[in-house]
Image (cartoon, helix red, strand yellow):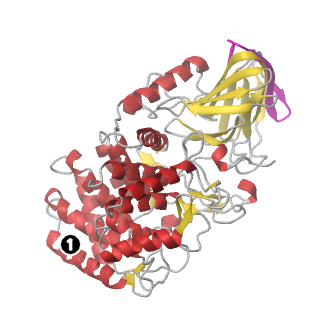
Amino acid sequence: MQQPPIADYGFLSDCRSGALVSRDGSVDWWCPGRFDGPAVLSRLLDADAGHWRLAPTVASRVERAYRPGTLVLRTVHHTTQGRVAVTDALAAEPGARGHELGRNSPAVLLRVVEGLAGRVPMRLDLAPRPEYGLLTPYLHEQPDGSVLAAAGPVTLALRGGAGPLRVTGDRIRQDFTVAAGEVVAFDLAYAPTYGPPPTRLDPVAALADTTAAWEAFRETHRYDGHYADLVRHSATVLTGLTYAPSGAVAAASTTSLPERIGGDLNYDYRYCWLRDFAGTMRAFWVAACPEEADRLFAWAARSIGRVGAGPVPVLFGLEGERDLTEYDCGHLRGYADSRPVRIGNAAWRQRQLDVPGEVVLAVWRFHDYLGETFDTELREMVVGLAEQVAATWRLPDQGMWETRGAPRHHLSSKVFCWVALDRAVRLAPRLGGRADPVRWAAIRDEIRATVLREGFHDRVGAYTGWFGSMDLDASALLLPLVGFLPADDPRMRATIAAVERELGAGDGLVRRWPTDPAGFLVCSFWLVECLVLAGEPERGRALFERAVTHVNDVGLLSEQVDPVTGAQLGNTPQALSHIGLISAAWRLTEPGTA
């Protein structure tokens, strides 16, 4: 089977789990327990690992869009026999509104077919394969016409349709015809085998309620700056990547979609990176609301725990799990034969010195919403992060790109060490008796002097990726964005120009480094911000408008884009890409805002 392009997938979310549905109507990825849990449908990574297709049996021309302000996806199939719409969603808890969205999602996938014109022949084909395709469940036809699928820890119940559902071998199928004005609805409900049974919902009523829940949530979030439609939709996507029970933000909804087709740089991004968490907080500050800052920072503080001598954790499971040991799913062939397929992420063991600065910067940005006196855990987190930076900033690390080679003295890591202490000094009045702003300020100034002395390479004429390196790195664009240097500083301006000239890949794309095979989307948005800060807003605007042409037809961005083919690459939807879009649009709206 030739797999659809990554950009062919739409994203469904109940703010607990995520699913991907292709343009041709196949749900090829669903992890119903939570984003980082085992998939029951994973044809995304292997043709035989489970899917649920619901589409016409004849050729169709497809148009699709999200209901405004939601992650409810409506796909219209135009055929020679007529037109039919399929609306897909992951159900919200009945009656959930506002910030209740996702707190108690019922783990039900809704698919509602509506005849629009003529009579269209349709087919349902469901092949459940729990545990990333390792299990083939027993399928039991029920007296009420539904089918129960049970294997290992997973039970699924498929209900609805035009008559009883039938088991054919190891899958469930139904052929039916939909005439104009008719509605045929299905729901696929998940439950742990040894717990309460799958939730029963009326799929039509549940779809209407889920749509209303998303619309009500978005109504509480206002953004009136430039590119409002793009920003609001990106904020909705980030909300969809948020695991509502804890507030953690998944970096993406998928694992092991490749950075290069056929390559082995395939990683599991379904966890919460503190870097992405901090960026999402800023994006919500811009495009949503700060109401839940207390709860979200509480998640971060409790996940980090008391900061000791070891490296600050880089990422966590969605409920704060620390051990994310990585393994290879050897039975899966991978997207477009791109192996390995990884579950877990070995970066949890790395030292990445930028992470404390990312978190402290987020606290600083929200300090006005967190009260005059921080609670104990928040105070201890900020003080602990500052103290660790003070003790470890001279060490080499793996850097923000999470290289798996030898550690180096990465420029962006040192700069974020400066950020951590600079913002901790400013926050000191709220941090209690353990704060040490005089010592922190002295070390901050030493870090700054070191970066200015060691980070700029005279022969290259720019700040480079690590001390002594001649390789440009797009992460140098972060210096003006965090206030380390003004964008019009001569050395910084030279660096911006060099990145644009040497790492620009055309069509609004920017590579991370010279040999990077694809454009890394957040780097494009960093360059937009730098151009605005350097006094060139029109050039920044032009670059932004080229970069956002890479959204797919329903407004989603993956991690990277192939500069030759324009194909999206990497895990999707990618939080960091949507964070970058929101931040760049805000910079174009409010150039002087931090």
User: Which residues are drawn in magenta?
Assistant: 166-184
Left or right of 22? Residue 401 is left
Of residue 318 and residue 587, the one placed in the foreground of this image is 587
Q: Main secondary structure of the magenta part?
A: strand
Where residue 125 appears, as percent x and y from the top left, is 78, 31
Task: Please identify the quarter of the rendering in which residue 420 is found.
Answer: bottom left
Image quarter where the C terminus lies is: bottom left
> Which residue is disc 1 drawn over?
440
Please report the residue visible at 30 percent of the width from the left and 65 percent of the height from the top.
385
Of residue 288 and residue 128, the one placed in the foreground of this image is 288
Task: Please identify the quarter of the rendering in which residue 213 is found.
Answer: top left
Left or right of 583? Residue 419 is left
Of residue 555 and residue 360, the one placed in the foreground of this image is 555
| Farthest residue, direction top | 181
Instruction: Decide whether residue 459 is among the magenta residues.
Output: no
Please report the residue visible at 23 percent of the width from the left and 67 percent of the height from the top.
422
Is residue 70 visible to the viewer in this orientation of the structure? yes
Where residue 90 appears, as percent x and y from the top left, is 57, 32
Neighbours of disc 1 within 10 Å: few (<14), some (14-19), many (20+): many
- Reply above or below: 402 against 230: below
Task: Please identify the quarter of the rendering in which residue 143 is found.
Answer: top right
Of residue 483 and residue 308, the one placed in the foreground of this image is 483
